[in-house]
Image (tube, rainbow, N blue to C red):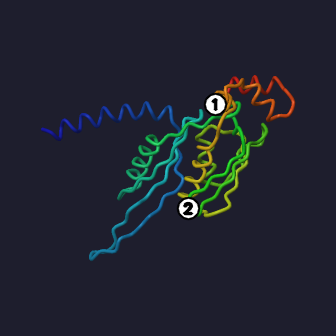
Amino acid sequence: MARDEGRGRGRGRGRGEREERDEFVDKLVAINRVAKVVKGGKNFGFAALVVVGDQKGRVGFGKGKAREVPEAIRKATQEAKRNLVRVPLREGRTLHHDASGRWGAGKVVLRAAPPGTGIIAGGPMRAIFETLGVQDVVAKSIGSSNPYNMVRATVDALKNQTSPRSIASKRGKKVSDVLTRRTGGGQSSTADAADAA
């Protein structure tokens, strides 16, 4: 009796997940197969690393382990949706400023880029930028090529991103005042673009 109730709840939950999936884009970054040697042979397990984002400034990553690949991916996707981070983007297409991030032996450097540059980044970092909604960025990994460390280092760098609006509110100034210092000459068009961001 209890099993039937659980099954019913599971079906309802699946519908909710389908609606969420439309909002989020997920990318499989890495899948790892491990084998445990036992008396009767080998037991295989799978570990998946997934990046999820809404392409509007939110991104998260998760890892999942299971005996089957689809189950490992499902677990990783669920964890990624729980760990979403909001990143301010300039004009909705690139970063506000250069940043560097580190996790363990993984080190990455991210640079804002002019329109038309595209995403110049390695595999795991590219997946993050595509799901985040960044269109122009130059990124370089200068440490470990382990995808787990690269993803964590990239998210670490993105967490340090600040927008001119947040800086202005902290200092009690207008956004245009903050941008005038950055550009060197009071370009109102840049200030208007920052107000819109």
Q: Considering the numbered disc 1 on the image, is that residue within a helix, a strand or a loop?
A: helix
Residue located 68% across and 28% down the image? 168
Q: Position of residue 23 (x, y in %)?
A: 50, 32
Q: Nearer the viewer, mark 1 or mark 2?
A: 1
| Amino acid on which disc 2 is placed | Gly
Instruction: Left or right? Give the position of 70 relative to 121.
Output: left
Name the amino acid type tagged 1: Lys
Judge by depth and name the residue closer to the eye, 169 or 75: 169
Q: Any mark on residue 105, and which?
A: none
> Among all residues in the image, which is located at the extreme right?
185
Return the mark for residue 170: 1
Q: Quadrant of residue 134?
A: top right
* Front position in the image: 172 or 149: 172
Residue 91 percent coordinates (x, y)? 71, 30
Residue 77 found in image quarter:
top left
Q: Residues within 10 Å of mark 1 (few under 14, many from 20)?
A: few
- The tag earlier along the polypeptide, 1 or 2, is 2
Residue 52 in percent (x, y) is at: 51, 42
Question: Could you tell me which residue is drawn at 77 percent across and 30 percent down?
Answer: 179
Using the image, determine if residue 129 lies above or below residue 44. Answer: above
- What residue is drawn where x is 69% and y is 35%? 93
Vertical relation: 45 (above or below) 39: above
Residue 101 placement (x, y as % from top left): 63, 52
Callout 2: SS: loop
Kindly give the residue lying farthest to the front in the view shown: 172
| Badge 2 density bin: few <14, some 14–19, many ≥20, Cα 10 Å | few
Residues at marks 1 and 2, CA–CA distance in whole angstroms: 31 Å
Q: Nearer the viewer, residue 100 or 150?
A: 100
Image quadrant for the C terminus? top right
Query: If the image is split into quadrants, where does the N terminus sit?
Result: top left
Mark drawn on residue 104: 2
User: Residue sitting at 43 percent across and 30 percent down?
Assistant: 19
